[in-house]
Image: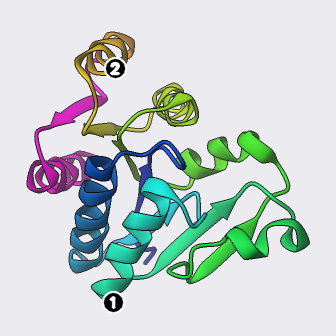
Amino acid sequence: MSRIVIGVMGPGATATVADCDAARNLGYRIAQAGWVLLTGGRAEGVMHAASQGAKAAGGLTIGILPDAPGAGKQGISEAIDIAIFTDMGSARNNINVLSSDVVVVCGMGAGTASEAALALKAGKPIVLLNTDINSQKFFTHLSQERTFIAEDVAGAIALIQIILRTV
């Protein structure tokens, strides 16, 4: 039986303190639920914070990295258990979303927006957490049936549980 993989996508260097706090808590709660955490794998922003949270709860973390193995080893989060090097740059965003059962968007940036759009295009559900009203309206307009808005981390976990029961 395969494990459930929850992707957490969000800004790297431009992540806010609130984005990182929510991501850390989210990663922790994902691991507590027994799910595998998938992020972009780098040691910055939402991906680093979510991975740290999951590791603090004893969870399994996967990082889908944009670089080749030799180029990016120093930038990998120490909280990543399985590093997958793609040498694909931003094109790795498609791997992130296709490998996730549910994608949680925590904060917003250009790369994060591309991941959310790719997820919806692939028929994957997304949960928006810590996003602004314009982002919420945009992604809800793209897919009302696959876009869910969480008020907080507990709400995001509850939405993931509901989504997983229906897929």
| Residue at mark 1 | 58
Instruction: Give neighbour class at mark 1: few <14, some 14-19, many 20+ (Cα, 10 Å).
Output: few
Q: Amino acid at mark 1?
A: Gly
Q: Quadrant of residue 76?
A: bottom right
Residue 145 lies in the magenta stretch = yes
Label 1 element class: loop
**Residue placed most toward the observer, 115 or 109:** 109
Residue 23 shows in this picture: yes
Magenta stretch bounds: 144-167
**Left or right: 104, with 64 as reference point:** left
Q: Amino acid at mark 2?
A: Ser
Residue 23 location in percent, x, y? 31, 58
Q: Residue at x 87, y 64 (%)?
A: 68
Residue 4 shows in this picture: no
Mark 1 to mark 2 CA distance (whole Å):
32 Å
Does 79 sit above or below residue 159?
below
**Residue placed most toward the observer, 98 or 92:** 92
**Left or right: 159, with 17 as reference point:** left
Identify the image quadrant of the N terminus: bottom left
| Residue at mark 2 | 135
